[in-house]
Amino acid sequence: MAADGIILDGESYLNESMLTGESKPVQKVKGDKVIAGAINGNGSIKVTVSHSAKDSYLSQVIKLVNDAQKSKSRTQLLADKAARWLTVIALVSGIGTFLYWYLAGQTLAFAMERMVTVIVICCPHALGLAVPLIVAKSTALSAKNGLLIKNRTAFENSRKITTIVFDKTGTLTVGKFEVSKIVSLQKTIDDKEIIRLSSALEQQSEHPIATGILQKAKELSIKIPNTENFNAITGKGVEANVEGKKVAVVSPGYLKENKITIPQGFKANDTETVVFLLIDDVLAGYLALSDEIRPESVEAIKTLKENNIKSILLTGDNGKVAASVSKALSMDSFIAEVLPHQKLEKIKELQSKGEFVAMTGDGVNDAPALAIADVGIAVGSGSDIAAETAGIVLVNSNPKDVVNLILFGKATYRKMIQNLVWATGYNVFALPLAAGVLYHQGVLLSPAAGAILMTVSTVVVAVNASFLKVKA
């Protein structure tokens, strides 16, 4: 049962990324609050439940998503309105033409012929296809290029976006800890040996740091040795005997407590988590792990700037990490250490300033913001809740696809307008001719000619739709 609570006894590191988006596990001690949905690490904790499942923070997030989705109204396509009006105009113009010529002394057959020609010319056949053809073409092209459109209104509104708000973990970054640096402090030990011994201790753990080290061992095709007398040092690391040696993988705090000198020149940046390898109580080296920025993110933010669209980082991660990522990507600003309901409020705040806001995220913690944003864009590799809430899903989880979405949205809208202008505009010239305005000058359209003109307009609309392309 999902429920919030307070720690009565024990301490551990909890993975709260599902709710906060913070990539590092967070240390929790006696008296700290724990939230439903967090995943406990290696430590043991005793928790007193503070309220029932329906009142938990996770339930509140779900309610925020539902409320935000209900607050949106569906817009009716311009083509539907135009087609209805053109139908009315065709009938009124046809009847008006019949009465004019009949009362002017022409024969019943002549008056009927003019009325039929006007109605045929004004048939909203091309107009009825003007937008659906673009819709079909754009939906197929989008899917082919990694954009899954769930909500047509959201896609068509993408051309209006002035600000894009990005979640960090899993959106602009890979979303998992990976070994970014291996440093050996002994000549007899190389990088592979550091990974080999470290992975031996971490092979039984599901901690994000352990997962990162084991992944590196897999990439390097390292055979992981067995361990004996394994022991978890709560909040500090792990130790065990490996091949007759006492091996430990510990935090910087453990080194300070045991008065082990941190190597000269050692300096970790704000985005890295560092663990040290001890062999028989002697410092052998260290590993730095970090949530790497996606290679595509840099180009995506750069292209947004070129198109005068602001980019803002909105994350539950700590301020130092957010500042580092924001600076690395040259983003306009960042907002850090926010919970799901606060993300929603930040989106509302931007909207109140007149910004047309798109939100891009991948987690449960992003769902309320995705729902309330003018355009919600979910990363395909993220949670089902995020994908369900958003109007558009990036199948390839590539931030650059956000830029492609906006540019394609603008191109699609241009094609729609072109088709609507043609489908209605030609009537401005054809209708008077069909009505017989140039009859006395010897120009008169027959019903057959009217039918041909109507067909030509439909062909033009279809050909124009076929030229729609995604610029990668």
Image (cartoon, rainbow, N blue to C red):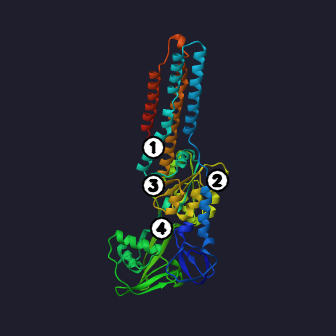
Q: Counting residues from the N terminus, which is met first, the one under dot 2 or under dot 3?
A: 3
Q: Counting residues from the N terminus, which is met first, the one under dot 3 or under dot 1?
A: 1
Which residue was labeled with disc 3? Answer: 296
Say which element carries label 2. helix
Using the image, tell me which numbered label, if any, was put on residue 290: 4
Q: Amino acid at mark 3?
A: Glu
Say which element carries label 4. strand
Q: CA distance from mark 4 to mark 1?
A: 42 Å
User: In which quadrant of the rendered image does the N terminus lie?
Assistant: bottom right
> Residue sitting at 49 percent across and 82 percent down?
260
Q: CA distance from mark 3 to mark 4?
A: 17 Å
Q: CA distance from mark 3 to mark 1?
A: 29 Å
> Residue sitting at 61 percent across and 52 percent down?
72
Q: Position of residue 421 (x, y in %)?
A: 53, 32
Q: Residues within 10 Å of mark 2 (few under 14, many from 20)?
A: some
Q: Amino acid at mark 4?
A: Ser
Which residue was labeled with disc 1? Answer: 136
Q: Counting residues from the N terminus, which is met first, the one under dot 2 or under dot 1?
A: 1
